[in-house]
Image (tube, rainbow, N blue to C red):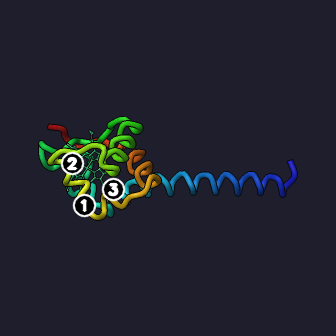
Amino acid sequence: MKKSARICVLSFLVLFLAVLSASAQDGERLYMTKFCITCHGQKGISIDPNYPNLAKQNELYLIHQMKDINEKKRANKLTLLMTEHPVVTGISDEEIAAIAAHLTKITPLKSH
Ligand code: HEC
């Protein structure tokens, strides 16, 4: 392989890894900055028995539930805590996907 081709392959690899690690970090950061942590707990174990634990939940299920909640397809007294929250309702599909990917990976500290 030519030297320039090797450099090209290497730089693609570095870029690929950078994108991978950036998206992994984003989910964790978003979970904090979008206030999810205040109700669903630092490690995805909720702070109140009325709130669902999210740690290790199936990724696709989390995405569907968050979208349903944001689109107000899911509604009861408790869902209001999310649908009336100005930051939570403003999150994008990309942010939802990043948070869901983070939640499926974290190891809970304890469970109820
Ligand atoms: C003010 C408290 C609060 C905040 C902040 C909050 N949630 Fe929730 N969340 C709840 C409650 C309460 C429910 C249960 C709602 C219901 O019963 O319909 C819930 C439900 C969920 C569900 C559905 C779980 C299931 O098992 O069906 C997901 C997923 C979720 N929240 C993710 C998030 C994410 C991601 C954020 C941050 C962007 C967030 N929540 C912020 C209180 C909160």
Locate residue 89: give its quadrant. Answer: bottom left
Location of the C terminus by quadrant is top left
Residue position for label 1 = 85
Callout 1: helix, strand or loop?
loop
Seen in the picture, residue 9 relative to 105 is either above or below; the reply is below
Measure how far apart labels 3 and 1 are at the Cα level. Answer: 14 Å
Residue at mark 2: C-beta within 8 A of ligand 1: yes
Please rate how many residues cluster around mark 1, counting C-alpha atoms within 10 Å: few if below 14, some from 14 to 19, many from 20. few
Left or right side of 24 for 67: left
Residue at 40 percent of width and 39 percent of height: 59
Residue position for label 2 = 79
| Kind of residue indicated by mark 2 | Thr
Callout 3: helix, strand or loop?
helix
Locate residue 34: give its quadrant. Answer: bottom left
Measure how far apart labels 1 and 2 are at the Cα level. Answer: 10 Å
Instruction: Tell me residue 36's x, y (percent).
Output: 27, 55
Along the viewing direction, whichever of 16 and 78 lies nearer the viewer: 78
Along the viewing direction, whichever of 69 and 87 lies nearer the viewer: 69
Residue at 79 percent of width and 52 percent of height: 6
Sequence-wise, the earlier of marks 1 and 2 is 2
Residue at mark 1: C-beta within 8 A of ligand 1: yes
Residue at mark 3: C-beta within 8 A of ligand 1: yes
Please rate how many residues cluster around mark 2, counting C-alpha atoms within 10 Å: few if below 14, some from 14 to 19, many from 20. some
Residue position for label 3 = 31
- Outermost residue toward the right in this view: 2
Total marks drawn? 3
Instruction: Tell me residue 20's x, y (percent).
Output: 54, 51
Left or right side of 68 for 81: left
Q: Which mark is residue 36?
A: none
Please rate how many residues cluster around mark 3, counting C-alpha atoms within 10 Å: few if below 14, some from 14 to 19, many from 20. many
Instruction: Tell me residue 111's x, y (percent).
Output: 18, 38
Sequence-wise, the earlier of marks 3 and 1 is 3
